[in-house]
Amino acid sequence: MSGLDIPDTVDAAEVTSWSDEFDVVVIGFGIAGGSAAVSAADAGARVLVLERAAEAGGTTSMAGGHFYLGGGTAVQQATGHEDSAEEMYKYLVAVSREPEHDKIRAYCEGSVEHFNWLERLGFRFERSYYPGKVVVPPGTEGLSYTGNEKVWPFCEQAKPAPRGHSVPVPGELGGAAMVIDLLVKRADELGVQVRYETGATNLVVDAGKVVGVAWKHFNETGAIKAKAVIIAAGGFVMNPDMVAKYTPKISEKPFVLGNTYDDGLGIRLGVSAGGVAKHMDQAFMTAPVYPPEILLTGIIVNKLGQRFVAEDSYHSRTSAFVMEQPDSAAFLIVDEAHLQNPEVPLVPLIDGWETVEEMEKALGIPEGNLVATLNRYNENAAKGHDPDFHKQSEYVAAQDKGPWGAFDLSLGKAMYSAFTLGGLATSVDAQVLREDDSVVPGLYAAGACASKLVQDGKGYSSGTQLGEGSFFGRRAGAHAARS
Ligand SMILES: Cc1cc2nc3c(=O)[nH]c(=O)nc-3n(C[C@H](O)[C@H](O)[C@H](O)COP(=O)(O)OP(=O)(O)OC[C@H]3O[C@@H](n4cnc5c(N)ncnc54)[C@H](O)[C@@H]3O)c2cc1C
């Protein structure tokens, strides 16, 4: 058996007895499934969630807790950051490799309401802003920049605003578990049934329409009849066969970000009923070198000694460009005046050298290339600009006071972490779509198993996964309940 296998569908005519009957069955209780279940129940549907693990949370419970929201949220307003749905829309369209305009529009126009809905679950984003360039704010600050809003060319395409809203839990791990606990509580209040240690195994179909789910609980099996099924079963970073086929760089050495059940079964279930998966070759892979942001005054070069990205890019954008370089190798070069240790040691310092020529040789860069690149950068930096990559002037500084140090951003040397971004094509209401864009009746998908608004690491903004997982999870639940 291969991890690429598409499960068979079960013909409804062959189901001799249904174990249960519900209006809406949700597969998986992470941020997307929990939001879908609560919304469907809120709209009056009888809802059952099947959860393969012994408790709710999935990968969501590991997440730091950024939600990408904007358009004038209470935190943006309280901290004096002007934003509008239109500017947010322009930004997300600009960073998306294949923008789905209707979904981006709905997400941006619904963002303030979604922020309010999240807070109504029972927590409050702190009305505070962290101004520095960070991966996650150091404390409980509610707002920071988590994307490329201030990075060229996007800063010219949409008015920059910080949109990374963090739950009030410090640190990089586990903050979003708080939201899962609140969703579990809300689902319980609304009468949602949850069956743990019960995995969906197949979809039940009747003349092309999804009408139920087959399940397994240890040795017991059965089939549940449903008017609608919402797949919210996570991504595929834990499926070695799918990773090898679609995102092979992830198998090279990164630390994978996911839970055991991120095996792509949700995506494969959707495909079994006629859905199509998109952007399966795209992944978020990152090894942030900052903070401290002073390191971004340096230059990042490939093994030929050439620059290839504005160094002030969001970390996942820089990393995505590194992956495209020869051997996915890259070095960050800084002089003594700007060299500090990264606060999180993911990118190792290789060594220091008295001259650029010595450094070039030691790094195996063809003779003269690094010297020429650094000279050009320094000449422009002396004039306060970077005409080659348009790095913002606050990060432009000549690197001319030796000795020089080099950090290794190469895949296999730096510690990259990764998750997958591809998933089932969906409509603005999270209905699963076929290759020809027609809807698979009765079937929805949201979260990591669905296609994303921003489908690659170059455009990725932290918080879009939790943001759109919950947003489109809600739309799936509400639409499924109506139908
Ligand atoms: C360390 C870390 C930090 C992160 N930080 C952020 C962040 O700050 N902001 C952000 O936006 N994103 C972040 N992410 C990414 C984000 O956490 C995920 O993309 C998101 O949580 C996925 O949510 P989901 O609901 O789609 O899937 P999950 O939360 O994984 O939920 C899916 C659920 O489905 C269940 N399941 C799977 N298969 C079946 C089946 N066959 N039957 C029944 N149940 C099944 C699983 O057990 C799981 O509980 C982070 C990820 C990690 C690992």
Image (cartoon, grey):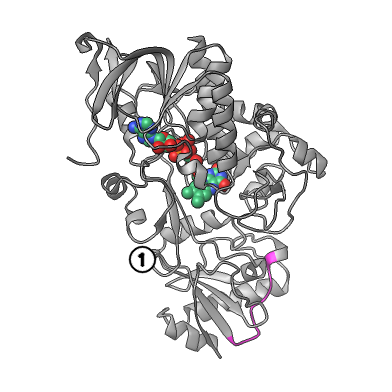
Question: Quarter of the image holding residue 71?
Answer: top right
Q: Position of residue 346 (x, y in %)?
A: 50, 67
Question: Quarter of the image holding residue 445?
Answer: top left
Residue at screen point 55% across, 48% down:
174
Q: Quadrant of the N terminus?
A: top left
Position of 415 relative to 23 (above/below): below
Residue 371 in magenta stretch: no
Residue at screen point 68% across, 68% down:
396
What residue is pinned by disc 1? Answer: 327
Residue at screen point 68% across, 27% down:
113
| The residue positioned farthest toward the bottom in the image shown | 354
**Which residues make up the magenta segment?**
395-403
Q: Amino acid at mark 1?
A: Asp
Q: Position of residue 77 (x, y in %)?
A: 80, 38
Residue 401 in magenta stretch: yes
- Relative to residue 152, is residue 212 drawn left or right? left
> Looking at this view, is 217 or 386 the one in front?
217
Position of 262 relative to 253 (above/below): above
> Looking at this view, is 256 or 380 the one in front?
256
Query: Which type of secondary structure does the marked residue at label 1 adopt?
Result: helix
> Looking at this view, is 408 or 192 the one in front?
192
**Can the viewer see residue 277?**
no
Q: Position of residue 12 (x, y in %)?
A: 25, 11
| The residue positioned farthest toward the left in the image shown | 1
